[in-house]
Image (tube, rainbow, N blue to C red):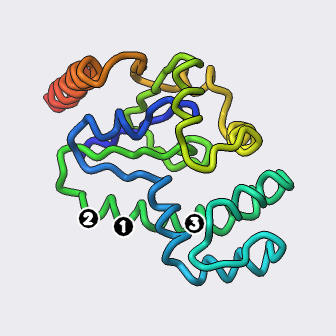
Amino acid sequence: MIRIGIIGSIGSGKSFISMLFGHPVFNADYEVKLIYKKNKKCFNKLRRKLPKFIKTFPIRKREIISAVSSNKKNLKIISSIVHPLVRKEMKSFIMKNKKSEMIILDIPLLIENKLNKKNDIIIFINSKKSKVIGRLKKRRNFSEKLIRSLKENQLIISKKKKLADYVINNNFSAHIMKKKVKLIKEKILNERNNSRY
């Protein structure tokens, strides 16, 4: 099984590119949404730690945004509770898909949280600033303050780019991006197959 780690800045289009590979995708942001929606234990822990902000179940995104915007330390508190749950779901996903030829790990803090392995293939998604801002503004609950807080929690973009095996420039139409991903996927499979001999 080939593990592909997709990294890049917030709003670069990581999830879009991940889906183009046509293989099982572990989307950490989606898993967090499910945890907020379904995990009562998580809610109780967050409510105990942040009673001024976390009041309703399912947890509302605006409560999380309010907590993080109020104090940067609150992001660390939330992460300490939520990240172990995401890690557990990731392990379950990998086990479930262990017979797959390839799996895609769409995890914003893949490297920062040391979730990558030595043989993982890292792909950095590069995107123009104007494109990134345009995508972020389309999101519900868009908050510049929250985006700044999340960016501070990620490795400097230039460092991330250097760690990558491949770079995909996501500044084109969906049709062109499909072709770009197909070429990289073929290259990865050929290199991995050749290394066996």
Mark with earlier residue (1, 3): 3
Q: Mark 2 sits on what residue?
A: 96
Q: Position of residue 83 (x, y in %)?
A: 59, 61
Sequence-first disc among 2 and 3: 3
Disc 1 residue type (three-letter): Ser
Q: Residue at x 25, y 36 (%)?
A: 21
What residue is at 46 percent from the left and 26 percent from the top?
A: 124
Question: Type of residue at label 2?
Answer: Lys
Assign a secondary structure to mark 3.
Answer: helix
Mark 2: secondary structure: helix
Q: Using the image, tell me which numbered label, if any, was put on residue 14.
A: none
On the image, numbered disc 3 is attached to which residue? 84
Q: Quadrant of residue 15?
A: top left
Above or below — where is 130 with respect to 80? Answer: above
Mark 2 vs 3: CB contact within 8 A: no
Q: Are marks 2 and 1 in contact (CB under 8 Å)?
A: yes
Q: Which of 10/25 is in front? A: 10
- Asked if residue 132 lies left or right of residue 27, the reply is right
In the drawing, what numbered circle is on residue 92? 1
- Expressed as whole percent of the image width and height from the top left, the position of residue 23 reads 22, 45
List x then y, in percent, for residue 152: 74, 38
Q: Residue at 21% x, 41% y: name it.
A: 22
- For the residues labelled 1 and 3, the Cα–Cα distance comes to 13 Å
